[in-house]
Amino acid sequence: MAQKEYVWKQLPGTFPWMFQQSKEPITGRPMSVRDNYVNVATGKKPMWLPAYSFESNICWPDVVEEHPVPETDGFDYWGVEWQMVDVAGGMITRPGTRVIKDFSTWREDVKWPDLDSIDWAYDGEKISSRFDPDRAHIYQCTEGVFERLHEMMPFDETLTAMFVEPESSLEFFDMMADYKIKSCNYIFENYGRIDGVLYHDDWGHQLSGFFSNKMFRELIMPATTRIFNFIKSKGKFIELHSCGKNTQYLDEMLEMGIDMWTPQMGINDPVWLKENYGDRMTFAFPIEGLGEPGIDESVIRRRVREFVDFYGKGGRMMASIFLPPDMADRAAIARDELYNYSLEFYKNND
């Protein structure tokens, strides 16, 4: 029987396009790659230390238009205008774009997407047709409640509104949580097995979080916790993508039920995170130095082993091995060493 043809919308080379590509099966493992990945994400004993992203499939629906579809200059389904930044390989809101004319009129200005009119069944069948059944399947839930507000009006006005009009801000976040919960439910019902949700909401800058912990608890946590409670009620783990130096919110992250955080490197100290929260939260850190000029295979394997020896203790760790296409051979060597060395590491470290 001929394979069914689908209409694929994303442009080659963009992140959504890469997320939607099929991956070669991972074979020869003593247990399911999916089961080991979920065990690590949720704090159970691993059999080996997973290669972050490589051992999962990303669920990136075409019908959830939080960005323009395809991923290029244009408008999302909220009416926010985006532009591609080639040097960064990603999208930002176009300077000057605004949907909310004034925060006092957000109820009139915001037009909510009609989720019931979307053909979830077709898109779910299409996207899941490329999932590897042995990998973990992760839904990318982008543009969290705070991000969506500051995408609809300037950033400084967003923070001012949260300070001056906290009750109205809470109402906006609560309605956005309703939207997130409903869209997640459609994903869970139509995209095959979904094991976890990667929730995106950037909460900080280079030096600290955007909010005091008091403001975070009062304004960000209620709606976000409600979203997370729904996800957990469906048996999914929660991974957080939140750029910025957000270590001040770690206790709140745990309280909200976050299982895993992939912190922004360079401003969040991986050693401190491992030593202070590594028994309660899973992290994914990069293995440093794999792209260094002139190194040979022995150096790559040694650096992987050093990573496992330090960060692998106690589990709750994944390794990011992201190298450019012309270093694919190095990435393959690193993944080979990561799997084989960590398999023995965990056998010998009960």
Image: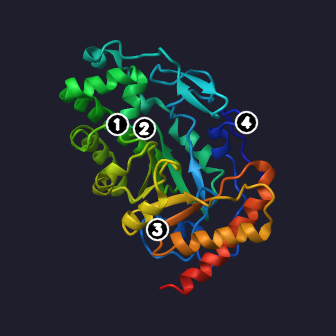
Neighbor class of circle 1 (other Cα within 10 Å; few <14, some 14-19, many 20+) is some
Which residue is labeled 3 in the image? 316
Numbered mark located on residue 205 in the image? 2
Badge 1 amino acid: Phe
Residue type (three-letter) at the residue carrying disc 4: Pro
Instruction: Pinpoint residue 139: horizontal percent, then vertical percent.
Output: 50, 48
- Could you tell me if residue 51 is visible in this image? yes
Q: Horizontally, is 213 left or right of 95 in the view?
A: left
Mark sitting earlier along the chain (1/3): 1
Image height of 18 relative to 96, above or below: below
Q: Position of residue 67 (x, y in %)?
A: 53, 29
Q: What is the three-letter code of the residue carrying label 2?
A: His
Which residue of the protein is positioned furthest toward the left in this rendering?
167
Which residue corresponds to the image point at 26% horizontal and 23% vertical from the top-left? 161
Instruction: Identify residue type, mark 3.
Output: Arg
**Residue 107, horizontal then vertical, whole percent:** 28, 19
- Work out whether 76 lies above or below 242: above
Q: How much space separates mark 3 and mark 4, taking CA atoms? A: 34 Å
Q: Gap in Å between the C-alphas at discs 1 and 4? A: 35 Å
